[in-house]
Amino acid sequence: MPSHEDEEQGDVFVDESDIIHEVDVDDEDLPDAEDEDDIENMEDQDDSIHIFTGHTGELYAVACSPTDPVLVATGGGDDKGFLWKIGHADWAFELRGHTDSVSSLAFSHDGQLLASGSFDGLVKVWDTAGNLKRTLEGPGAGIEWVRWHPKGHLILAGFEDCTVWMWNADSGNFLSVFSGHGASVTCGDFTPDGKTICTGSEDATLRIWNPRSGETIHVVRGHPYHTEGLTCLSISSDSTLAITGSRDGSVHIVNITTGKVVSSWGSQTSPTEGDPESIECVSFAPNFPWAVSGGMDRKLTIWDLQSSSPRFICDHEDGVACLAWLGASSKFLATGCVDGRICIWNCLSGECVETFKGHEHAIQSLAVSSSLEYLVSVSIDGTARVFEIRNFR
């Protein structure tokens, strides 16, 4: 408020002798309404080209058809699965019948059939038009994952009751039960040659099985292996090695033929930062001598298999929940994060070359279309989103 004295003196002027210091002000440095709009737009940024919103709950699983470049399956906590097509908003088929969360989805390698596994203990087999072909009953416990044999219509499923079951999807006949784990079977798969099965469990062991006899070939446990439950598993394209990650923050590579641990990598988190964070995803590079691991320590580590050392440690702003290679010969890898972002990494240089935004909450799974043009993500925000990746080949 001006004083009474100022009012008597009238206007007060500043002359050159009163100037202490001149500062140049660039108009670009001044915030304006447009800048504020840009900030809001960045927060609301959505890079997806298609959003599927048919679900009414959290999404857990996604699979892309290996033969149809636009056919996608999703499943989640609303007890539903859907078949839908990228770019065809008016085409979707609900996969009805499950009575609990749909936890896993997988297309057969010829693209003719889709398997859905649920915490209701059932595996359902569908054709690509969404027609139910048959229901496969197991021990009644919740299903952690489903996988197809690489050369036929055999289905493998891991259960919370410590067992793994196998069926013939064409006839519906039960073929074998693999018993031996002491806790929930959290991960597993056929080897790419179809001759062996590898499974990992909350009991901190990896088991290698003969699929014909149902007998255990090797049990990998104890030092120098994991000390806590396994969370993820991947098998090399030549069927010789399995890589596993665990809640103990370590990654191990096992020779499938001998059952011996050939490489062990500890958490990349500094000991001063507390207990190791869980490893959530692992994979062998399809066409390079690398392996990758991601976890709640907010890091993607690209390992050199020849030197058994990290090539690159790629930092994220939040935990890494899932990953996917952008093609069988690609150097590019996508990571799905707890903060809803998707990062695209050039694994030759260790650089993040793209960040996709759009999801509001943690991403649970990623899948790549058979044309290598689309990346599909599902999140606990209840949506599936499609992003263009044709520039990363």
Image (cartoon, rainbow, N blue to C red):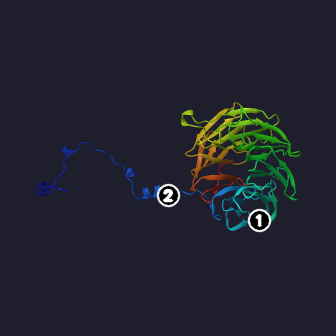
Q: Which numbered disc, 2 or 1, marks the residue that appears first in the sequence? A: 2
Q: Can residue 389 be seen in this view?
A: no
Q: What element carries label 2?
A: helix
Q: Residue 86 carries which label?
A: none
Which residue is at 89% across, 45% downward? 213
- Could you give the CA–CA distance between mark 2 and mark 1, rounded to whole angstroms? 38 Å
Label 1 sits on residue: 130
Q: Disc 2 vs disc 1: Cβ atoms closer than 8 Å? A: no
Which residue is at 56% across, 37% downward? 274
Q: Circle 2: is it few (<14), some (14-19), or many (20+) Cα within 10 Å?
A: few
Tell which tag, 2 or 1, sits nearer the viewer: 1
In the depicted structure, whether residue 12 falls above or below residue 348 = below
Q: Report x, y in % for residue 1.
A: 20, 56
Amino acid carrying label 1: it is Gly
Q: Can residue 327 be seen in this view?
A: yes
Q: Circle 1: is it few (<14), some (14-19), or many (20+) Cα within 10 Å?
A: many
